[in-house]
């Protein structure tokens, strides 16, 4: 049982680390948006629009606006 | 002509029967409703981002035609450094834009991957909840207007960064509250764990050294929680005391202090119990409540932003024959402003040059454009439909009709928040009763048995911890809210579900609430005596003739793709249009205009006739169609004994037509927002509880006046921000579903409250009598809270959807 005299203070140190981690995370906006980032797993970030489309779109818009 | 109901692949709205546009998705043709949706969908598909359609949970915003030219409109902001956002180091700026149309996580992904692929944009953050997009970019490499263009290209509408400083301040406040909550939560978990050891020690025996050790640790963890998370309660208690009032936080601060000081003194003297766990638990649950309140308050502030967005951000000021762009907020009385066709009037004023039609539908509910000649008054926020005019500003922007409406809105919101105050007062009373019981217990034990004094007091305090009581309502509502969300129904004010059952009157706003809002061709009749014309031909001719018309009926033909060059000599008259198509002259208009010899009796938008010199060729029957399952829903509402009322700003004929089709007997036409508010107030003065269902901006103050409000699909953002329920689908059947969900929720809340009260009433006397040791109290309290949560969970259990959601996603193979 005397092991608890070591383990519990250790847990308190871990708690302090957890609190600082939480404060850091909140300060850096990790909790500002809880929705989007879960989706980045299923939505593929590597699919960048090919350059051709990027250029073509300006023309398309011009045409649309006439 | 057979009409098959299809919904647009991009925006999910019904595709007009005469529209033939489509996009190719994975080898299949999917219908879209307009050229705007077609352009946006094509761009998304060509960029290889088809998975947006697969993963999105909400349909997209229907792009307006002016969105596609937004890049040109923004070009004049390119050189305004103040609009580039706050400068960071090495030539980068952080821009905060509010963007309309962000509805789900897939939107955020789409925006991020479109923007981040561009040279000059480093990082993009999208906040789905508030619609803010934070862009880290380099103005040297990219124009501001390009960013706007990219956003508009994929179907989102950016707004100028109006109040970035204010929104940063709010973000700060929210993060602060979250920090306090998080610290209290982590602290609570730890201290509860030590408390479990101490309570177990009470029951089974514990070595003295170990007990003191656990108390030490509890003290070490509790003190920072009290100082950091509890600080807010002390400052607010002190503030109210210094104003000689007893605020809600006074008993809170008192309870925390008593428990903490008592525990400390017990700890120092080395006898008796410590109650650090009660201290942190109180702080945590109260912080949780405060955080929820903060989120709601911020949502209300958002309303102000939505109002501001109705007005254009810039105005074209005319001075000595020269015109220049100035911020609309700087306009002053007697300034001359030019407003071009299609633009929004930036201020209230008088027309001094030119005449036009103004669309005031959003503000007055009047669906037809109003003629404006020199000397007529125009209101800020209405849209110039016909041609450029010059106006003289007659009111400062702060006093304009829209701003006054904003203040009205604020007033009715404060009026409504009384409910919230009421529940706070109950909480205060509850704390007061608990404290009184604790004091009485203390007095009794002081006389009889000093040994039992503190354990009894603490048993009272812990066992009566209002956890189960305070969880009873929110837990049930959270579960019900989740179930509603699965049906596409957004619950934005939680008390609304509770009071839903007391509703006895439902007030509808006709325009767009009961009807689908825009005229459609419901029937095309060809003249049997005329050969050589097919239905498609006459629709195409009609669409060509209506190309330049801004009359509402022109919308019925707007979705037929036609080539503007095929029509010549277009003349727009009051009651119709004429022009030359394929070398022949045609006229399109009502019976009088086209000289067709019939008596026209049809209500609504009436009939249009297409004629040439030889006589009539075709007849188009137009109407503002009722929303899906309007009839059934009205029957259901009547069967619940609810009074149904239509309160509309529209013309009497239009309202009468809708009233007779839905079977609603009480209706009022030509109502201004002020009159609507008075009507609702008089209903409420007679003890009626009113549910208001609306959609227009003019309804916003009225919506927040009513006891409960709902907006239906297609509602303006402002109306949405004041509504308690937002229905994202098009069917009125959702109203029925919400009412039934309200019934279920209320019965669960009643069960929860009954349980929590019964538990407290039974347990407190035993605790005061010293028959319950604190660890039993803690266990009882946790179990009773658990029971409440489990009971509430029943509400979220999946039920088959009432109405299948509009099919808008990709069909996965």
Image (cartoon, rainbow, N blue to C red):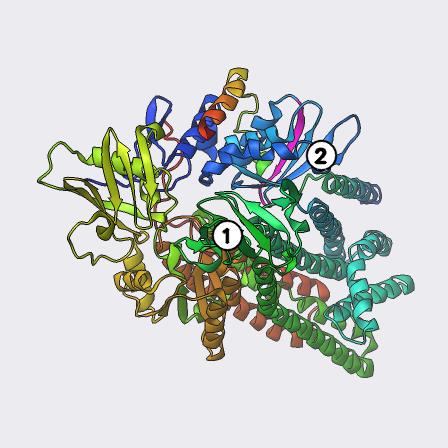
Q: Is residue B560 visible?
A: no
Per the model, the C-alpha gap separating discs 1 and 2 is 33 Å
Residue at (29% x, 37% y) in the render: B579
Residue B94's tag is: 2
Which is more toward the observer, B751 or B386?
B386
Image height check: is B770 above or below B507?
below
Task: Give neighbour class at mark 1: few <14, some 14-19, many 20+ (Cα, 10 Å).
Answer: many
Q: Name the residue furthest front.
A: B320
Labels 1 and 2 touching (C-beta < 8 A): no
Query: Where is mark 1, residue-wise?
Result: B382
> Which range is magenta?
B120-130
Q: Is residue B438 above or below residue B631?
A: below
> At x 43% / y 66%, what residue is drawn?
B671
Labels 1, 2: one chain: yes
Residue situated furthest left in the rendering = B529
Task: Measuring from the top left, give residue B581's x and y in whole percent.
Answer: 26, 32
Q: Magenta span has B129?
A: yes
Query: Considering the image in quadrants, where does the C terminus of chain B appear?
Result: top left
In this picture, residue B601 sits left or right of residue B139: left
Quarter of the view holding residue B762? bottom right
Local SS, label 2? strand
Residue B136: % across, % down? 69, 31
For residue B273, side relative to residue B358 (left or right): right
In which quadrant of the rendered image does the N terminus of chain B lie?
top left
Label 2 Cα crowd, 10 Å radius (few <14 / some 14-19 / many 20+): some
Q: Position of residue B264 (x, y in %)?
A: 87, 62
Say which chain tag 1 marks: B
* Rendered residue at 84%/72% (across/down): B242
Principal SS element in the magenta part?
strand
Identify the residue at horizontal 68%, vertical 36% (top origin). Answer: B95
How many marks do you count on the picture? 2
């Amino acid at each position: 049982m005397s092991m608890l005299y070591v383990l519990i203070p250790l847990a308190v140190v871990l708690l302090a680390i957890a609190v600082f981690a939480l404060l850091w995370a909140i300060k850096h906006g990790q909790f500002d948006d809880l929705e989007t980032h879960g989706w980045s797993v299923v939505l593929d970030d590597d699919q960048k629009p090919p350059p051709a489309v990027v250029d073509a779109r300006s023309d398309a818009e011009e045409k649309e606006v006439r | 002509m057979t009409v098959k109901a299809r919904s647009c692949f991009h925006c999910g709205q019904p595709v007009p029967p005469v529209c033939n546009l489509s996009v190719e998705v994975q080898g299949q043709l999917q219908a879209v409703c307009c050229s705007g949706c077609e352009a946006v969908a094509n761009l998304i598909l060509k960029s290889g981002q088809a998975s947006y359609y697969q993963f999105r949970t909400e349909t997209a915003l229907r792009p307006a035609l002016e969105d596609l030219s937004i890049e040109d409109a923004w070009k004049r902001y390119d050189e305004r450094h103040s609009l580039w956002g706050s400068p960071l180091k090495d030539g980068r700026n952080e821009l905060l834009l509010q963007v309309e149309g962000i509805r789900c996580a897939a939107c955020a992904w789409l925006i991020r991957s479109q923007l981040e692929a561009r040279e000059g944009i480093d990082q993009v953050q999208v906040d789905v909840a508030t619609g803010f997009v934070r862009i880290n970019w380099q103005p040297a490499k990219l124009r501001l207007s390009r960013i706007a263009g990219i956003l508009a290209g994929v179907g989102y509408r950016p707004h100028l960064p109006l109040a970035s400083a204010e929104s940063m301040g709010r973000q700060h406040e929210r993060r602060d509250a979250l920090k306090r909550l998080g610290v209290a939560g982590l602290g609570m978990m730890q201290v509860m764990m030590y408390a479990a050891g101490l309570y177990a020690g009470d029951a089974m025996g514990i070595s003295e050294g170990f007990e003191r050790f656990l108390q030490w640790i509890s003290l070490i963890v509790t003190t920072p929680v009290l100082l950091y998370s509890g600080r807010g309660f002390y400052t607010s208690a002190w503030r109210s005391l210094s104003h000689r009032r007893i605020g809600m936080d006074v008993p809170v601060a008192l309870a925390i202090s008593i428990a903490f000081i008592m525990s400390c003194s017990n700890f120092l003297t080395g006898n008796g119990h410590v109650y650090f766990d009660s201290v942190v638990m109180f702080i945590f649950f109260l912080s949780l409540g405060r955080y929820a309140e903060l989120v709601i308050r911020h949502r209300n502030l958002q309303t102000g932003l939505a109002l501001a967005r109705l007005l254009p951000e810039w105005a074209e000021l005319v001075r000595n024959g020269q015109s220049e762009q100035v911020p609309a907020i700087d306009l002053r009385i007697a300034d001359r402003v030019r407003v071009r066709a299609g633009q929004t009037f930036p201020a209230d004023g008088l027309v001094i040059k030119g005449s036009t039609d103004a669309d005031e539908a959003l503000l007055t509910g009047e669906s037809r454009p109003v003629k404006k000649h020199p000397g007529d008054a125009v209101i800020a926020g209405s849209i110039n439909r016909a041609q450029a005019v010059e106006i003289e500003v007659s009111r400062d922007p702060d006093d304009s009709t829209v701003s006054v409406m904003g203040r009205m809105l604020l007033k009715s919101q404060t009026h409504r928040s009384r409910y919230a105050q009421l529940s706070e007062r109950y909480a205060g009373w509850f704390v007061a009763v608990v404290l009184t019981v604790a004091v009485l217990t203390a007095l009794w034990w002081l006389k009889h048995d000093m040994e039992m004094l503190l354990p009894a007091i603490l048993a009272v305090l812990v066992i009566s911890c209002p956890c189960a009581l305070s969880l009873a309502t929110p837990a049930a509502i959270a579960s019900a809210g989740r179930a509603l969300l699965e049906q596409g129904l957004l619950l934005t004010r939680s008390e609304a579900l509770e009071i839903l059952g007391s509703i006895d009157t439902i007030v509808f706003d006709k325009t767009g609430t009961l009807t689908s809002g825009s005229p459609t061709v419901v029937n095309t009749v060809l003249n049997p005596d005329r050969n050589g014309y097919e239905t498609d031909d006459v629709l195409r001719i009609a669409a060509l003739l209506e190309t330049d018309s801004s009359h509402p009926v022109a919308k019925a033909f707007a979705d037929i793709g036609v080539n503007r060059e095929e029509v010549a000599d277009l003349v727009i008259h009051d009651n119709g249009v004429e022009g030359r198509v394929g070398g022949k002259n045609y006229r399109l208009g009502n019976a009088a205009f086209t000289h067709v010899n019939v008596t026209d009796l049809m209500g609504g938008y009436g009939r249009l006739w297409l004629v040439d010199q030889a006589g009539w060729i075709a007849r188009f029957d137009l109407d503002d169609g009722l929303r899906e399952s309007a009839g059934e829903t009205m029957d259901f509402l009547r069967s619940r004994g609810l009074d149904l009322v239509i309160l509309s700003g529209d013309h009497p004929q239009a309202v009468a037509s809708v009233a007779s089709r839905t079977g609603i007997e009480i209706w009022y036409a030509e109502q201004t927002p002020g009159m609507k508010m008075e009507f609702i107030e008089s209903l409420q003065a007679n003890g009626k509880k009113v549910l208001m269902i609306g959609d227009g901006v003019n309804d916003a103050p009225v919506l927040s006046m009513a006891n409960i409000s709902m907006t239906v699909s297609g509602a303006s953002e402002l109306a949405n921000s004041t509504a308690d329920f937002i229905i994202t689908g098009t069917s009125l059947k959702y109203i029925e579903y919400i009412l039934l969900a309200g019934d279920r929720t209320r019965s669960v809340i009643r069960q929860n409250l009954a349980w929590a009260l019964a538990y407290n009433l039974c347990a407190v006397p035993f605790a005061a009598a010293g028959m319950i040791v604190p660890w039993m109290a803690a266990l009882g309290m946790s179990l009773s809270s658990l029971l409440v949560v489990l009971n509430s969970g029943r509400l979220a259990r999946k039920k088959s959807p009432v109405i299948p959601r509009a099919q808008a996603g990709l069909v996965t193979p």
